[in-house]
Amino acid sequence: MKTFWRNESGGVAILFSVASLVAFGMVGLAVDMSRANSVKGDLGHALDAAALAGGQLETGDRFAAAQKAFAANYRGQAMVNEFKAFVAKTEPYEVFRTEALVTVPSTISRVLGFSQFPIRSFSEVVRGNDANLHIALALDVTGSMKGNRLTALKASSAEMINTMFTNLKRNDQVKFSIVPFARYVNVGLGVRSQSWLSVPDDYSVTKYTCTTSKPVIREYNCKTTTSTKYSDGIPYESKSTVCEKEYGQSVTTCGDKTTNYKWNGCVGSRNSPLDTLDGQYVTRIPGLMNTSCNVAVQPLSSNKGQLIKTINSLAASDETYMPSGLVWGWRTLSPGEPFDDGADPSRVTNRYLILMTDGVNTLSPNYPTHNGNNRTLADKLTADLCRNIKESGITIFSIAFEVTDIGVKNMLQTCASGSDRFFDASDAVQLSSTFKSIATQLLALRIAR
């Protein structure tokens, strides 16, 4: 009987040892599983960062960008066995996917036969947006934009338009307006009869006048002089020839002289504070006769071909007055007059204004024209408009293109709807990158895994 009890005690001891080992292993398994879950969280964060880095690119080595972002963000101690980054699908939206496999070595749970825990995870970002987007491009086309700057602007803005239409589910989801501005804005001849505009019909005035002049008989002692002049704030060297002149007897001529007055689509400003408002059009906007301005405003449109055509037709001339671009960019986005093309308030959920300029306000208003030179006033009106536009629910992106004036940069940064919506582009490459970055924000690149 004693032997029996001794044998039974040994069996119990063995069972107790096995049970203790299993319990110890289960505790270890719980610890190791907790470690694995922590690694999985770190892995997911790094894969999200990688997917966003690669997904926001349209060209270039997207895999390299994703891999770099993954390496910078992965904090887990587990060894990475595999990393992939690729476009998973393109319709109806592009989906960029990142995947990784890591192995977490076990500790105490080895007693249960678990040597490691493989963890595979992925992240996907979608380039696309179900919202309806109305975007106004207020583009500086002043004289300082001539040459390479204008070429860069055309290429960058056209690329952005193409990107938006390519990456949205439906073409009618996005509409652009294009507002070329310098001293004035051209609203187009087709709006001449609108109630918000005050402009007469073209007309001519004929008067009988006499003029007296002395003909130049000869010039002598001619000298060439050099002076510095300015065009839209940009200095340039001007050469001229100055001569002494010998005049003959006075000659008087008389006859009818006809002066033609024609409207080319250019508009000035209403008196302050209406020049910083979108509304109260019982006080009409003044049309300016015999005044030159750029190509006409392109109202909101989802016709990509027409939008690109307008961009390609831009030319550079005249001086800078930013409030012209801001106020008319705002007006193209409003549901009512002056422009209401395609503006359906029930569908529009996101409105944006992109202001691009390369210089300072060289002009100010002397109502209704913009022929003054009070930069302080022009800058104040610019700031007032930026504030009013943002308060109306429109998001502003501002771009300083090859701007060296710190005051202008500060003004544009304050104008933007947040520091991440101000861009300082020092050359054509950065301007292109800027428009791409804005397109990425507007397309609402988002994690969808």
Image (spheres, rainbow, N blue to C red):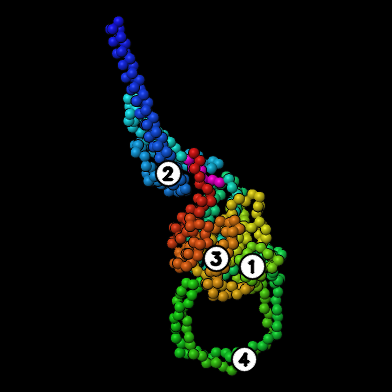
Query: The magenta stretch spans which residues?
Result: 124-129
Q: Residue furthest top?
A: 1
Under tag 4, what secondary structure? strand
Q: Nearer the viewer, mark 2 or mark 1?
A: 1
At horizontal 51% and vertical 51% (from top left) the residue drawn is: 441
**In the rendered structure, are the residues bearing label 3 and label 1 in contact, judged by CB atoms less than 8 Å apart?**
no
Question: Which quadrant of the figure has residue 141?
Answer: bottom right
Q: Which residue is mark 2?
A: 50
Q: Residue at x 53, y 43 (%)?
A: 93
Residue at image x 46%, y 74%?
A: 235
Which percent across, then down, holds residue 214?
Answer: 58, 91
Residue at disc 1, secondary structure: helix
Please say whether residue 178 is visible from this viewpoint. Answer: no
Mark 4 / mark 3, whichever is N-terminal: 4
Tell me the distance, in whole angstroms, between the alpha carbons under discs 2 and 3. Answer: 38 Å
Q: Which residue is mark 3?
A: 383
